[in-house]
Image (spheres, rainbow, N blue to C red):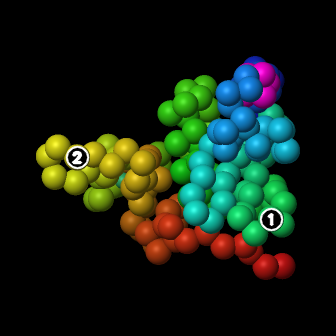
Amino acid sequence: MAISRELSSSIRQRIADLLALAENQRDWRYALAKNYNALGLYADFGGCLALTPDGEVLEILDDFSGPIPNQADRFWKNLALCQGSKIYPELAVLIDPKPETAQTCRWCNGTGRLEAGHSIQFSEIICRCGGLGWEITKSSDVHFSTKDAGIRTRKTV
Ligand SMILES: [Zn+2]
């Protein structure tokens, strides 16, 4: 993914900031910064996604096989960038623009957040839309399919 020099510099600085504070060593993002020179954007039970200063999205699975550049499909990249931009707002420019065929997400009504009842909000549970608030339902323009949500596997060659 091509990114601007300014954004690349910002990612480098975010990585340096993570590594500069000893208190960050318990943060999962610290290990990604230290081991892969990448900014952690998203983590789940299967692994995590991180962004390098060159704009590569690394997928690091929990099978200790090491990072895989550009393995994540558009859905996972957008999810990672959407979630990561909540902490690092400058990354929002990397999220794919909403296609004309996209519709408001039927699961979160466009908020990107799942809610249960009126008083409890599950801020840590990400909607099937990846937090974008929209989804593609037309099969010929697949950007996001609900069947892919929540399932991340290594592609075989
Ligand atoms: Zn949604």
Residue 13: which disc?
none
Query: In x, y percent, where is residue 78?
Result: 57, 49
Decide if residue 11 is in sight here. no
Residue at the extreme bottom of the image, as rendered: 156
Quadrant housing residue 84 = top right
Residue 5 vertical position relative to residue 70 in the rendered view, above or below: above
* 40 with respect to 85 (left or right): right
Residue plotted at (14% across, 46% down): 118
Q: Is disc 2 placed on a helix, strand or loop?
A: strand
Question: Which circle's residue, 1 or 2, is located before the other in the chain?
Answer: 1
Give the residue number, with chain letter if any, for mark 2.
120
Residue in the picture at 73% in, 23% down:
21
Please report contact status of discs 1 and 2: CB closer than 8 Å, yes or no: no
How many numbered discs sit on the rendered protein?
2
Q: Residues within 10 Å of mark 1 (few under 14, many from 20)?
A: few
> What residue is drawn where x is 60% and y is 48%?
42
Asked which secondary structure carries label 1, the reply is loop
Residue bearing the label numbered 1: 64
Q: Position of residue 61 (x, y in %)?
A: 72, 63
What percent of the width, then of the height, locates residue 44? 57, 58
| Amino acid, disc 1 | Phe
Please, is residue 80 above or below residue 13 in the view? below
Mark 1 vs mark 2, CA separation in Å: 36 Å
Label 2 beta carbon within 8 A of ligand 1: no
Quarter of the picture containing the N terminus is top right
**Start and end of the magenta stretch?**
16-20
